[in-house]
């Protein structure tokens, strides 16, 4: 058994680089201290301009099919999904991809930790059904992930 892996799902479309990557870098640092790997959906997707868009002209990594195939591959291979959907970003632009990734994870039997302060997401029955935990801050979400996976690291 290798090191456990957590997929870091969250808003990308419409985000600047810090909004999309900042929390992922912070989460990866915390997880690394517990010998838990993290996988970012942005690992081979450069920002084009000042904000990320849903797709860009790169047949290797930027087409809708390439993006979805890579993200589904990641969800299949991970042990757990940490979905971070802060209200300040979801109100600007919904993160449909993250919701789909949560559904994939649920279908595949992967535990999902949802971190959101958005009441519409917290109260949605399908979102609730896909998430084993619904928390309102990233530190609590990371505590759950490390608490569950540390023994496997």
Image (tube, rainbow, N blue to C red):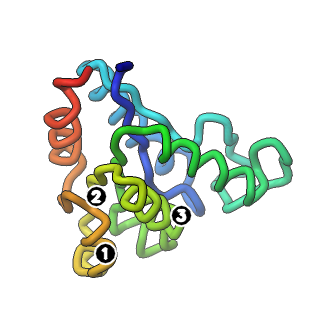
Disc 1 to disc 3, C-alpha distance: 14 Å
Q: Residue at x 42, y 75 (%)?
A: 91
Name above or below for residue 57 compared with residue 89.
above
Who comes first in sequence, dot 2 or dot 1? 2
Q: In the shown orientation, is residue 19 left or right of residue 4?
A: right
Disc 2 to disc 1, C-alpha distance: 9 Å
Dot 1 corresponds to which residue?
121
Viewer-nearest residue: 41 or 91: 41
* Whole-percent x, y for residue 123 in the image: 23, 80
Label 1 crowd bin: few (<14), some (14–19), many (20+), radius 10 Å:
many
* Whole-percent x, y for residue 19 in the image: 47, 50
Q: In the shown orientation, is residue 74 left or right of residue 5?
A: right
Who comes first in sequence, dot 1 or dot 3? 3
Element on which disc 3 rests: helix
Viewer-nearest residue: 63 or 51: 63
Name above or below for residue 105 compared with residue 70.
below
Per the rendering, the mark at residue 97 is 3
The quarter of the image holding the N terminus is top left
Element on which disc 2 rests: strand
Label 3 crowd bin: few (<14), some (14–19), many (20+), radius 10 Å:
some
Disc 3 to disc 2, C-alpha distance: 14 Å
Q: Residue at x 48, y 73 (%)?
A: 94
Dot 2 corresponds to which residue?
114
* Whole-percent x, y for residue 26 in the image: 35, 34
Element on which disc 1 rests: helix
Viewer-nearest residue: 104 or 20: 104
Q: Are marks 2 and 1 in contact (CB under 8 Å)?
A: yes
Q: Quadrant of residue 136?
A: bottom left
The quarter of the image holding the C terminus is top left
């Amino acid at each position: 058994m290798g090191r456990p892996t957590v997929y870091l799902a969250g808003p990308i479309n419409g985000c600047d680089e810090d909004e999309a990557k900042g929390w992922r870098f912070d989460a990866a640092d915390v997880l690394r201290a517990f010998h838990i790997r993290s996988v970012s959906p942005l690992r081979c997707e450069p920002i084009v301009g000042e904000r990320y868009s849903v797709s860009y002209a790169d047949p290797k990594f930027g087409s809708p099919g390439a993006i979805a195939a890579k993200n589904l591959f990641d969800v299949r291979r991970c042990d757990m999904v940490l979905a971070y959907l802060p209200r300040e970003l979801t109100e600007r632009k919904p993160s449909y991809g993250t919701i789909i990734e949560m559904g994939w994870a649920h279908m595949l039997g992967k535990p999902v930790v949802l971190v959101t302060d958005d009441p519409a997401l917290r109260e949605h029955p399908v979102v609730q059904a896909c998430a084993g935990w619904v928390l309102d801050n990233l530190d609590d979400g990371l505590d759950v992930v490390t608490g569950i996976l540390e023994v496997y690291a």
